[in-house]
Image: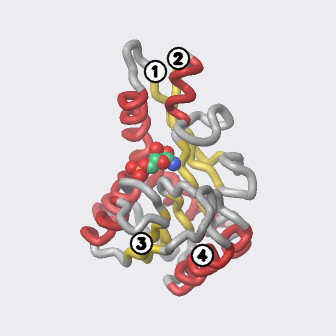
Amino acid sequence: MRPPRLGVLGSGKGSNYVAIAEAVRSGSLDANIMLVASDFPDAGILTQAHAFGHHALHIPPGPFRTKMSPEAESRLVDALHDAGTDLVILAGFMRVIKEPLLRAFPNRILNIHPSLLPAFKGLEAWKQALEAGVPEAGCTVHLVDAQIDAGEILAQARVPVLPGDTAATLHARIQVEEHKIFPKVIGNYWRELQSV
Ligand code: GRF
């Protein structure tokens, strides 16, 4: 089985990307990171990609706040294809994925979401969990489809909500689990795809 070629997309600090890149470096994830792309030119994920020596690319997203323009998303698809991408990894990518990307990579786009889906879809899910007063939060790796945070669930990890938790402490506890499950699920999912 050949290792998957990954294209990683992110808008933020990139701690999930770093966890994946470290798993690749240590050999616990057999994969190659071909491209790291962001909609923000100064996103931490691009700085991290430079540090790991991965190809880092800023794609100006166009005029909308919550999605890329069709032209921008098509540019992104071209860049992912040029890089030979097998799996697209959404590591904190804050824009809704539309047709150009969904059509180019059907069942090949994985996202990590900071809640136990289907609970708390959307933004700042850890805050939603805290405000709802649930005893347990967590994170979910799922396939991406046209619905938001609704594609097939591949794996989840649970964390307790502790007395005195703030949004920041709860999110930090969730992220510890994100960094463990995301690299594992990428490897497992690729093996599953190769076996069918
Ligand atoms: C994570 O909490 C992830 O669940 C969500 O966005 C955040 C990205 O964090 N989709 P980072 O940029 O990987 O640190």
Which residue is drawn at the image coordinates 68% and 36% (left, top)?
Answer: 118
Indicate the secondary structure of the residue bearing disc 2.
Answer: loop
Q: Position of residue 148 (x, y in %)?
A: 69, 49
Who comes first in sequence, dot 4 or dot 2?
Answer: 4
The mark found on residue 72 in the picture is 4
Residue named by callout 1: 161
Between label 4 and label 3, give the one nearer the viewer. Answer: 4
Q: Position of residue 102 (x, y in %)?
A: 70, 67
Kindly indicate whether the residue at mark 1 contacts the one at mark 2 (C-beta within 8 angstroms).
yes
Q: Is mark 3 within 8 Å of ligand 1?
A: no
Q: Position of residue 130 (x, y in %)?
A: 51, 23
Residue named by callout 3: 33
Residue named by callout 2: 135
Who comes first in sequence, dot 1 or dot 3?
Answer: 3
Who comes first in sequence, dot 2 or dot 1?
Answer: 2
Q: Amino acid at mark 1?
A: Val
